[in-house]
Image: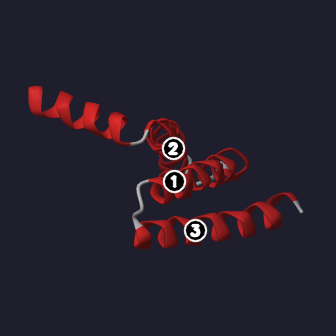
Amino acid sequence: MNKLINYFKESYNTSKIAFYCELVEFSLVGGASAILTFTVLDPATKLFIPMFFVGSILGMISTFYRKAAFATLLTGWFVAMNFIALLTLFG
């Protein structure tokens, strides 16, 4: 248990901005994923697409601060794809 606590403490101490971005990102993307899972036959796109979009932006910020190059590229891809989905959905 101490190893787990120390892991989160180290993550927080390494970058507070990234830590809080990841915390909110986890909540949004996890929630969006759950909404998609439970509404798959009649998807609640107006709920989960914006949640994925904001979560992806926060993921891109956190990976940038953590200097995780390929993770930043991957989350940037998610931002672009979710932006296109937002434009298609609300445009």
Residue 89 lies in quadrant: bottom right
Is residue 1 in sight in this rendering?
A: no
Q: CA distance from mark 2 to mark 1?
A: 6 Å
Return the residue nearer the eye: 78 or 21. 21
Q: Residue at x 49, y 35 (%)?
A: 20
Spot the residue most to the front: 14
Q: Are marks 2 and 1 in contact (CB under 8 Å)?
A: yes
Q: Earlier in the sequence, mark 2 or mark 1?
A: 2
Establish if 87 lies above or below 70.
Answer: above
Amino acid identity at mark 2:
Glu
Amino acid identity at mark 3:
Gly
Q: Are marks 3 and 1 in contact (CB under 8 Å)?
A: no
The quadrant of the rendering that contains the C terminus is: bottom right
Q: CA distance from mark 3 to mark 1?
A: 8 Å
Q: Residues within 10 Å of mark 2 (few under 14, many from 20)?
A: many
Q: Which residue is mark 3?
A: 76
Amino acid identity at mark 1:
Gly
Q: Which residue is mark 1?
A: 59
6 relative position to 91: left or right: left
Q: CA distance from mark 2 to mark 3?
A: 14 Å
